Image (cartoon, grey):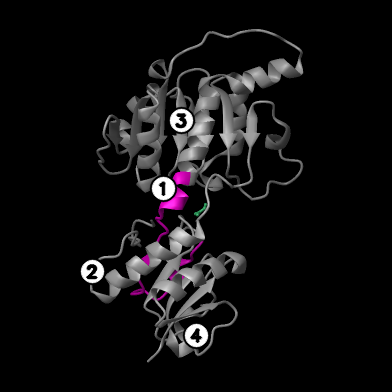
Amino acid sequence: MKTTFLYKSDPARGRLWAEVFRRRAPHIDFRIWPDIGDPSQVRFLAAWEPPDDLATRFPNLKVLFSSGAGVDQFDFTALPAELPVVRMVEPGIVRGMVEYVTHAVLGLHRDMPQYRRQQQEGLWKPLPVRTARERRVGVLGLGSLGQAVLEQLVALGFDCAGWSRSRHEVAGVQCHAGVGELPTFLARTDILVCLLPLTESTRGFLDARLFSQLPEGAGLVHVGRGPQLVDADLLAALESGRIGDAVLDVTDPEPLPREHAFWRHPRVQLTPHIASMTQPLSAAEVVLDNIERFEAGEPMLGLVDRARGY
Ligand code: GLV
């Protein structure tokens, strides 16, 4: 039986995936949604939002690949229980995130939001210059993105710590694990970066209680998922000065309604969920590597643990 790989995401990017498949796996019939061909031949599907009735529509589907890093957009209850689901872990998306977070952290570290405000007031006023060594950065989430970001921040000389639910080790980084170690991690964090996956336990994670454990005037860089942030609590923390400045790439909903306070808040910098994006050429290579692993009966990289939710 012929094998179809069905791609259901942005078609222009899909055409770049197709080039890689044509070159490296000409035996696979690569198709871009809605041109699905014979549905019984679809063994692999890459999607941001999979179609409904997946199991009945594609009875021979073997693997579902997320076309992005997150899988929180999938309704796991609607997917066949045994279907392996794979997150997008590819070098392009990792590099994009490293660039965005490094830019945001350096900006906060060197007081760029404050200089921007001073410029608008016509105020020429140097602030004390601190070195990276004197700035404590903390990253929530130590998956492949969190670890890559930390590697770069360590290389720049920042005093780095990380926190995740389970124990991790990252060279040059003080790693904390579990809710019990969260207060110690927060108390030593001048700039907090959120790179957590969205799960039931991270929904509303960035709230007043968490902010109250940070040092006065801490910076926030949020590149996780919008629903992890309690907007009203951030506004209150900005008001009280607990949080000095916030850089937000994700919101809930996206886009934010026009009247939302974040749009015009002088201490909030908003970007429209562009921190990082799957790069089609490297993504297709990584997916083909995973298909080879799957066919050889080896574990695929980025396989989702459904009980954990990421
Ligand atoms: C973007 O947020 C992604 O999950 O790739």
> What residue does disc 2 label?
298
> What residue does disc 4 label?
57
Going from N to C along the chain, the mark reached first, 1 or 4, is 4
Left or right: residue 118 compared with residue 108: right
The numbered mark at residue 192 is 3
Q: Mark 2 and mark 4 in contact? Answer it, CB < 8 Å.
A: no
Badge 2 crowding class, 10 Å Cα cut-off, few under 14, some 14 to 19, many 20 or more, is few
* Circle 2 SS class: loop
Q: Nearer the viewer, mark 2 or mark 1?
A: 2
Q: Is residue 205 magenta?
A: no
Count of number-bearing discs: 4
Name which residue lies at 36% across and 74% down: 83
> What residue does disc 1 label?
201
Going from N to C along the chain, the mark reached first, 2 or 1, is 1
Snapshot quadrant of residue 11 = bottom right
Name which residue lies at 71% across and 40% down: 260
